[in-house]
Amino acid sequence: MEHPYLFFVKLFEMIGLGHFVHANVHVLYMWVVMAILIMLGWLAGKNTKLIPESIQNVFEVLVSGLEEFMVEITGEEGRWLFPLAASIFLFIFIGNLIGLVPGFFPPTANLNTTAALALVTVVFTHVIGIKYHGSKYYKHFMGPVWWMTPIILPIELIGHVARILSLSFRLFGNMMGHELVLGILFALAGAFFAPLPIMALGIFVALVQAFVFFLLSVMYFAGAMEHAH
């Protein structure tokens, strides 16, 4: 797929790496998102004060709000899972937002990116289950009584695979759809201001999609922590 309008693609073409970035645009813009997050984290942690100001205040409100929301679902014992859940939320949110900047491509509009995020989430769900229940974690897949195991086990396995598909395709479909709509409007209108309402709506979509992924991840974590019944 060609991306002649993207800023970083043109930059890498100038240094002779055009073939790589054309084949891996999502990887390039994942690096951009990670660089943005590292820079924001450094700015938020630089010269921290008892009474927060500017970017420190924004980060503290965002992080503390997400943490308290997560603890309401998982309980206090789930607080240690917050760094992973918050990192996923921030990565998706920033990744969605940069697609609204002309010359930038949202990495979340690529299925490889969303599938990787979903795999990390679902695999870590089972890590949590084993940590809390040890070898008895298998009971989550067996059903309430032993003779229902041949029915419940395939359903549970399909359900856990479906989690990966659901997380991947929901985020990918929404962000790719938004990109296509913007591209069509730009092509038809031939002016910058015509797609502005859709771009404004895109900020809300970016936040909602990041929060939905975060919420589902937290619910999966909480389910793995619970005792099987």
Image (tube, helix red, strand yellow):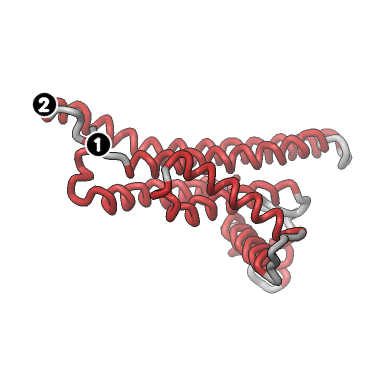
Q: Nearer the viewer, residue 115 or 222?
A: 222
User: According to the image, label 1 marks what residue?
Assistant: 228
Question: Mark 1 is on which residue type?
Answer: Ala
Closer to us: mark 1 or mark 2? 1
- Looking at the image, tell me whether mark 1 or mark 2 is earlier in sequence order: 2
In the image, residue 20 above or below residue 124: below
Q: Nearer the viewer, residue 25 or 211?
A: 211
> What residue sits 16% from the left and 30% below the top?
149
The quarter of the picture where residue 151 lies is top left
Left or right: 144 as drawn, with respect to 216: left
In the image, residue 131 above or below residue 152: below
> What residue sits 33% from the left and 44% below the top?
225
| Residue 117 % position (x, y) | 48, 50
| Residue 144 % position (x, y) | 19, 28
Residue 67 in view (yes/no) = yes
Q: Nearer the viewer, residue 184 or 215?
A: 215
Secondary element type, mark 2: helix
User: Dots 1 and 2: beta carbons under 8 Å?
Assistant: no
User: According to the image, label 2 marks what residue?
Assistant: 147
